[in-house]
Amino acid sequence: MRDRFACVTAQLIDADPRIAIVLADISADRFVGTARRRPHRVINVGIREQALIGTAAGMSLAGLRPIVHSYAPFLVERPFEQLKLDLSHQNLGAVLVSIGASYDWPGGGYTHHGPGDVALLDTLEGWTVYVPGHPDEVELFLRAAATTDDRVYVRLSEQVNDAPHARSDGRFSVLRTGTGPTVLAVGPMLDRVLAATAGLDVTVLYAPTVRPFDAETLRVVLAEPAVVLVEPYLAGTSVARVAQALADVPHRVLALGVSPHTARIYGRIEDHDAAYGLDVAGLRSSIAGFATASPSLVRMVR
Amino acid sequence: MHMTATTVSTFTYDDLPALMSRMTGDDKHTSSATSTLDVLWVLYHHVLRVSPHLPDDPERDRFLLSKGHGPMAYYAVLAAHGFFPAAWLDGFARTGSPLGHHPDRTLIPGVEVASGSLGHGLPIGVGLALGLRAQRSPARTFVLVGDAELDEGSNHEAIVVAGARALDQLTVVVVDNSSSSLGWPGGLAARFAREGWAAEAVDGRDHEELIRALAAHHPDRPTAVIATVEPKE
């Protein structure tokens, strides 16, 4: 995904005089050639993330369309007030593209893990959030974002699905239908959700565009009023969106995702998947248990 | 194209205290309330190429009030130069008024940036100057900060970037009323000069000095003008 991002962004900069990229050293090596050709639209501010966002906001104010890139914790968490004030409060747009996701570098530990990024952006108004699951989807979303003036966050990951399924209209894709719960797989979670739900009577939706949240499709496909969220970032991030979508329907929700503090285990990505129950075995166990918990059992517990 | 706001001003510098009184209710104003007054007047009356009739002109100069605290002097100067009716001043900070204790660019004609939280205007100004340069615009960008505002580290990120990118179309004016708690040993001009800026300190009440320093342009270097006023009480 990172390679496709760098390649497409370089093409966009060459093709459209409005497009610029602002960097804080991360991935600067990918834009050396473009910087030579377009020195005024490739800006590396060094390791200065407050200036990263402020500079992007100023370029937007000047009428450019800045793409802003860094590691997820340094793009969203460290300069969060700049996102709130320099972009949202000024009503300015930019395209933020992060790498690193929740634990793409397990050996880096919590300093380099960003499970809270989407939840933080949910405290702000009007952000479009893309969580692509395939390099083709990265390209689709980047090219779409380049043509608007919106505030956009694109969350890249090392974890990738075998095939692209994103729709260009931002709607969820219906990949499987059943009479039991609806499982919403966000971005890179799709392939393992399909594997984990094999043989289960569930509906599977694919959500690479998570904000705005496609409540309409969820309502249309909903069979049993039960929803499983499988999100590659902080567990429960989209629970409020499900609650809004189903405000008039008594329903159950199971929220799967990453814990607020990632495990202090270093190791491999797969070790972290297992630690949060986001591997195929963990997902199958959680989803099957949730699916077999009938509404009558829920009433008895109450 | 010459478009200073002088052509539309029906007010003079001597009218500013009365305009401010419409917001504060006070006949006299403390020096901290007026610390920015002379710099703002000089900018809008003599330096900036801006016009209330061409608010979206891509070639207009940009002025960013980063130090958004105590914006009464700013509002008085904007009203005096025709950006909005002076009658707006009477409703200052009341429900529904476009004029708050911190300015909002989406509510007030002529306001280029919403400010209030300190340390945001200069990084945005750097990006604005970079963006204008990328479009070969002749517009200059001016940012007003306070000496205490420079306590915020975000400014120092921006000062380095502006120096390294040789942003000659950017001018920062620091209104120095000695309000930084830990101070700036060696002076603020030295801080900017170390990063490659053309920097000088002037009397922040002397209009002739301010006009000269703010109008100055230094090839390949951003400009910092330290406008020294009376210490905050």
Image: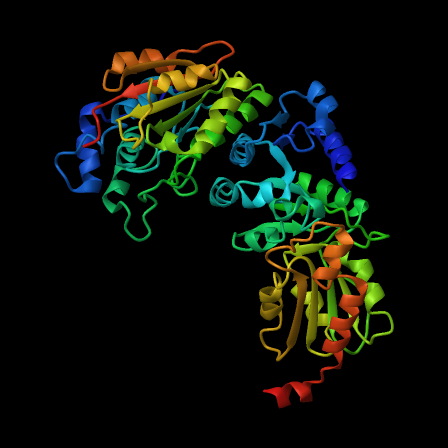
Left or right side of A60 for B16: left
Residue B218 percent coordinates (x, y): 45, 10
Residue B79 vertical placement versus B218 (above, below): below
Residue A275 appears in which quarter of the rendering?
bottom right
Q: Quadrant of the C terminus of chain A?
A: bottom right
Residue shown at 33%/27% (left/top)? B147
Q: Residue at x 76, y 64 (%)?
A: A205
Position of residue A165 measured from the top left corner of the image (x, y, whole percent): 81, 55
Q: Residue at x 33, y 36 (%)?
A: B84
Q: Which residue is outermost to the left?
A: B27
Q: Position of residue A218 (x, y in %)?
A: 70, 68
Q: How is the image coloured?
A: rainbow
Which of B7/A139 is in front? A139
The image shows residue A20 at horizontal and vertical percentages of 64, 30
Q: Which is nearer the eye, A186 or A37?
A: A186
Note whether residue B59 is visible.
Answer: no
Check the image and name the residue furthest to the top.
Answer: B219
Does residue B117 appear left or right of residue A279 in this picture? left
Q: Is B218 left or right of B210, judged from the image as shown?
A: right
